[in-house]
Image (spheres, helix red, strand yellow):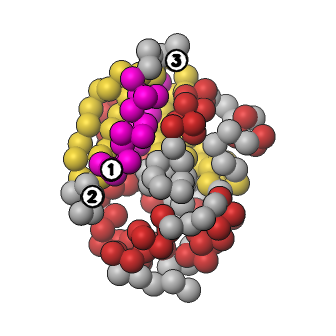
Amino acid sequence: MPMFPSSNWLQWICSSVDSDDLREKYDQWAATYEVDVADVWKTVPLSAASMLAKYVSNKQANILDVGVGTGLVGMALATLEFENLTGLDISPGMLAQAAKKKIYHSLSCCSIGDATFITLEKATGVVATGVFAETHAGPVELNTLRTKIEPNGVLVFTARQSFLPKLQEVLDQPGWVLLEQKLMPIYDDPMHLLVYRVSD
């Protein structure tokens, strides 16, 4: 099982050659993921969940956790008393770890835009941490994710500073309103945590 210092696991996962390679790597990593990323990533789930809670007051609202991983964001959301959590991820191994936390109403193995994704209900709030990155998801997926956000719903997501310009063309479209942005210097290439309100 992989166990990496922080400088290595980020490079390893972002060097995946395609979605199948990425899925296989996350499956390999699932059992030790939380230990491996703890020092670097530990502030991100609670920061993302807190940012969502600031703009979604209804604790029974449908919340979609995209790239759910082992469920770290879901745990933070549950701590903040959100009750209706749906998760999706491309990795069955990661989803198995998330399922153990028993906080998700449902979990789906799918990618943004595929047949299973299309069947998901719209959500008032969507969280996607660690999703928009090299070899993961980009502008096409961001645009597609919009279809699962209720009118005037919110999207909370992360992107490293070098990757954010690749998403800007989508974020500059009508209907995307930046509510808040927080810089998290957890990497040499700083992470941005952003929340957008999305309207029709």
- The disc, 2 or 1, on the residue closer to the chain's N-terminal end is 1
- The disc, 2 or 3, on the residue closer to the chain's N-terminal end is 3
In magenta stretch: residue 137: no
For the image shown, how many numbered marks are present on the structure?
3
Q: Residues within 10 Å of mark 1 (few under 14, many from 20)?
A: few
Residue 26 lies, in percent from the top left, at 58, 69
The residue indicated by pointer 2 is 189
Above or below: residue 141 compared with residue 96? above
Residue type, label 1: Ser
| Label at residue 162 | 1
Check whether the beta carbons of the residues at disc 2 and disc 1 lie within 8 A of each other.
yes
- Image quadrant occupied by the N terminus: bottom right
Magenta region, residue range: 153-172
Residue type, label 2: Asp
Q: Residues within 10 Å of mark 3 (few under 14, many from 20)?
A: some
Disc 2 or disc 3, which is closer to the eye? 2
The residue indicated by pointer 3 is 151
Mark 2–mark 1 distance (CA, rounded to whole Å): 7 Å
* Camera-side residue of 194 and 170: 170
